[in-house]
Image (tube, rainbow, N blue to C red):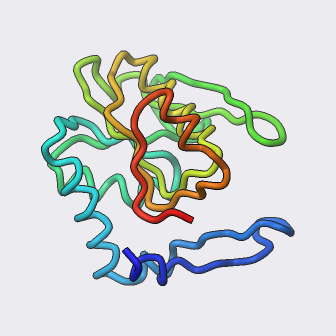
């Protein structure tokens, strides 16, 4: 885990002044570390009855697809509007300054699915909470939220734990 933390680069003042961005691209460039992250997640979830990985656009896809493959379960993307070709379910949610909308194919999860929602980073939890609303709209159950990085000072965990348990690999 410390090796992974060393591979996460701090980028000050991105995307705007005063923000310290945690950049995962060096971790992604290290095949051993990337494999370890996927293995750590697969080990945690292999015996938990997960039947579907739901990943949030776009960095969640980077971890969600190989995790689904490793676990032998289906993968479903949650995307911004206009990116999915078939009929979708939508949710609009509050952002710090305005609103956002996410979509998922209406048949992306089944009522019988036990879902793991994954993304690269947990900040305030609003986007992951919106993804959970999409999963719930389709009738599936959420087993847990998983994140590679958690910014605990933003308190997103408390928001999400009202919905399902939260697991993060690296916490700042």
Q: Nearer the viewer, residue 46 or 156?
A: 156
In the displayed structure, 19 sits above or below 65; it is: below
Locate the N terminus and report the quarter of the image it occupies.
bottom left
Q: Is residue 82 above or below residue 28?
A: above
On the image, the x and y values in percent for residue 55 come to 42, 45
Residue at screen point 66% across, 27% down: 92
Quarter-of-image position of residue 4: bottom left
The residue closer to the viewer here, 87 or 62, is 62
Q: Tell me which residue sits at (39%, 37%) in the image.
A: 165
The C terminus: image quadrant:
bottom right
At 51% from the left edge and 33% from the top edge, which residue is drawn? 131
In percent of width and height, residue 8 lies at 52, 77
Which residue is depicted at the point 27% across and 72% down? 36
User: 17 left or right of 91?
Assistant: right
Residue 91 horizontal/vertical position (percent): 60, 25
Task: State the image coordinates of residue 73 (x, y, percent, origin top left).
Answer: 19, 43
Relative to residue 27, is residue 35 drawn left or right? Answer: left
Q: Is residue 146 above or below residue 114?
A: below
Number of residue marks: 0
Left or right: 63 as drawn, with respect to 89: left
Classify residue 40 by image quadrant. Answer: bottom left
Quarter holding residue 116 = top left
């Amino acid at each position: 885990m410390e090796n992974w933390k060393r591979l996460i680069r701090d980028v000050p003042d991105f995307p705007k002044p005063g923000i310290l961005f945690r950049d995962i691209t060096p971790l992604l460039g290290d095949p051993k570390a990337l494999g370890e992250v996927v293995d750590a997640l697969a080990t945690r979830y292999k015996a938990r009855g997960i039947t579907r990985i739901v990943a949030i656009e776009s960095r969640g896809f980077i971890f969600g697809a190989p995790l689904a493959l490793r676990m032998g379960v289906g993968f479903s993307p949650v995307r911004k509007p206009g990116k999915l070709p078939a009929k979708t379910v939508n949710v609009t949610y509050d952002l710090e300054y305005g609103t956002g909308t996410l979509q998922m194919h209406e048949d992306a999860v089944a009522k019988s699915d036990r879902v793991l929602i994954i993304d690269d980073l947990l900040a305030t939890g609003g986007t992951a909470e919106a993804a959970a609303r999409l999963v719930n709209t389709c009738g599936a159950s959420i087993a847990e939220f998983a994140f590679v990085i958690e910014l605990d000072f933003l308190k997103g965990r408390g928001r999400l734990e009202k919905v399902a348990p939260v697991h993060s690999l690296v916490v700042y």
